[in-house]
């Protein structure tokens, strides 16, 4: 039936509008989907997921290569034949700040010996050595297959734990090892490689005694404290540098095989918005840390290694403000030790533990640093040998980490337990001597 001229059929108009709206939303949804897929692929490549270790590798090639490395792999852990899932690791926004600033080539060849590239080390506290001596731990290390010891010389409170000849160390003496040179010699007699650990900028004692060295609170002008009340030294202060270099030189004289710098970073927590670094001026943090490491390197003749946050392996530049840029530190060190405790990763990583997730985190961290630091720098991770935030802690937990590090090409590994309780770790090391690492990782 004809409608009168000028008459509006609202029902037809509504149907036409609804049909066009329907098609519009379908097209919009498809556009969003295509954009998301493109963005995902871009991020996948940008964050190194298609890096040289896994790029262009078919499943058959991966199996062939890994079977050559691990004869037992197909029997014990078939799941490890698949490259670690890249989406299991934290993904951070890429921040290129500073990565183009004065990147230098390595200033000298690696000083590491072949033994220094194949360490199976453990951390030993001065308190343990003071109470129980070195004979017992050396005997256990030899029995179970550990060949390296990390020993505190300047601890995380700033205390010098041996009678040092460095003049400015005397007010912060807290002697736990009466004769450090003799202790080092005792380890050497048992063919144990010794690493002298120096905690650099976290320093409660020196920060209290020498306030001119300390980080300042911009609100009061007094010494700044972090969220737990600890004091820090200004990473740009030349006197602080000279003090730490003098300790490093003394460790070389005492016979240590290597100097390890820890806490080579700026403090970062909720209180740092009030922190002021008087000696830094406008200097970028990653350059300040790199310059300090370079000075230490040029002042000693034994290998130098540095501890870095594990999260630095997953991002470029220095987006967190720690001052730790792999590319800027690498030219001045012989080894980089990322601290890869899953307990230090974001909460959902240790709350929802799985062996595959831990394996993936460690594999990717080691592989990323190897790629970024170059072939002349050893990557020697510090792995978790303590129970905190590890719901499935035991020998398989530790073995899984070691297997991931080795598979990614690590130059040995170090184990951390602040209480020096290495029963589970020694079980893994014994198994490695028998070629059973993967069987232990699988819980067999």
Image (tube, grey):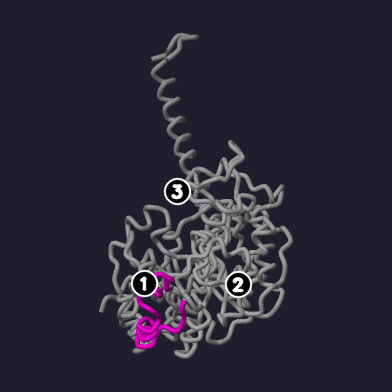
- The quadrant of the image that shows the C terminus is bottom left
Front residue of 233/77: it is: 233
Quote the CA–CA distance across marks 3 and 1.
24 Å
Is residue 387 left or right of 92 when viewed as pictured? left
The answer to which image quadrant residue 51 occupies is: bottom right
Front residue of 393/296: it is: 296
Label 2 packing within 10 angstroms: few (<14), some (14-19), many (20+): few
- Tell me which segment is drawn in magenta: 124-149
Which comes sooner in the sequence, label 2 or label 1? Answer: 2
Q: How many numbered badges does the structure rendering display?
A: 3
- The quadrant of the image that shows the N terminus is top left
Front residue of 310/81: it is: 310
Q: Secondary structure at mark 1?
A: loop
The answer to which image quadrant residue 221 occupies is: top right
Label 3 packing within 10 angstroms: few (<14), some (14-19), many (20+): few
Q: In this figure, which residue is indicated by the disc labeled 2?
A: 165
Q: Position of residue 433 (x, y in %)?
A: 37, 88
Q: In this figure, which residue is indicated by the disc labeled 3?
A: 228
Which comes sooner in the sequence, label 3 or label 1? Answer: 3
Asked if residue 130 lies in the magenta stretch, the reply is yes
Q: Position of residue 113 (x, y in %)?
A: 58, 86
Which mark is nearer the camera, 2 or 1? 2
């Amino acid at each position: 039936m004809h409608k009168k001229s000028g008459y509006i059929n609202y029902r037809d108009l509504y149907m036409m509008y609804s049909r066009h709206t329907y098609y519009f939303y379908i097209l919009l949804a498809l556009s969003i989907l295509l954009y998301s897929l493109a963005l995902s692929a871009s991020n996948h490549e940008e964050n190194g997921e298609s890096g040289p270790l896994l790029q262009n590798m078919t499943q058959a090639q991966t199996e062939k290569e890994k079977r050559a490395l691990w004869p037992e792999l197909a029997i014990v852990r078939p799941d490890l034949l698949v490259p670690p899932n890249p989406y299991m690791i934290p993904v951070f926004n890429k921040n290129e700040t500073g990565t183009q600033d004065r990147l230098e080539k390595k200033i000298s060849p690696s000083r590491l010996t072949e033994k220094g590239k194949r360490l199976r080390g453990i951390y030993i506290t001065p308190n343990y050595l003071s109470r129980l001596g070195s004979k017992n731990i050396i005997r256990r290390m030899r029995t179970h297959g550990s060949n390296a010891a990390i020993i505190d010389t300047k601890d995380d409170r700033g205390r010098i734990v041996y009678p040092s000849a460095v003049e400015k160390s005397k007010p912060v003496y807290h002697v736990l090892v009466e004769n450090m040179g003799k202790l080092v010699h005792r380890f050497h007699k048992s063919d144990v490689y010794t690493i002298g650990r120096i905690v650099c900028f976290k320093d409660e004692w020196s920060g209290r005694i020498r306030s001119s060295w300390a980080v300042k609170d911009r609100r009061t002008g007094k010494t700044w404290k972090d969220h737990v009340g600890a004091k820090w030294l200004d990473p740009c202060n030349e006197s602080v540098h000279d003090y730490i270099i003098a300790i490093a030189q003394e460790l070389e004289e005492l016979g240590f095989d290597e100097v390890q710098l820890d806490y080579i970073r700026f403090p970062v927590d909720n209180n740092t918005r009030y922190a002021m670094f008087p000696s830094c001026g406008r200097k970028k943090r990653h350059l300040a840390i790199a310059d300090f490491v370079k000075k230490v390197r040029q002042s000693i003749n034994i290998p130098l290694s540095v501890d870095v946050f594990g999260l630095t392996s997953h991002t470029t530049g220095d987006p967190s403000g720690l001052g730790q840029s792999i590319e800027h530190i690498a030219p001045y060190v012989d080894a980089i030790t990322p601290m890869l405790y899953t307990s230090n990763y974001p909460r959902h990583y240790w709350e929802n533990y799985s062996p595959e997730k831990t394996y993936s985190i460690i594999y990717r961290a080691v592989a990323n640093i190897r790629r970024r630091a170059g072939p002349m720098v050893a990557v020697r991770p510090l792995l978790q040998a303590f129970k905190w935030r590890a719901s499935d802690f035991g020998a398989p937990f530790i073995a899984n980490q070691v297997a991931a590090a080795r598979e990614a090409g690590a130059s040995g590994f170090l184990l951390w337990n602040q209480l020096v309780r290495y029963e589970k770790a020694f079980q893994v090391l014994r198994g490695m001597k028998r070629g059973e690492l993967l069987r232990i990782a699988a819980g067999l």
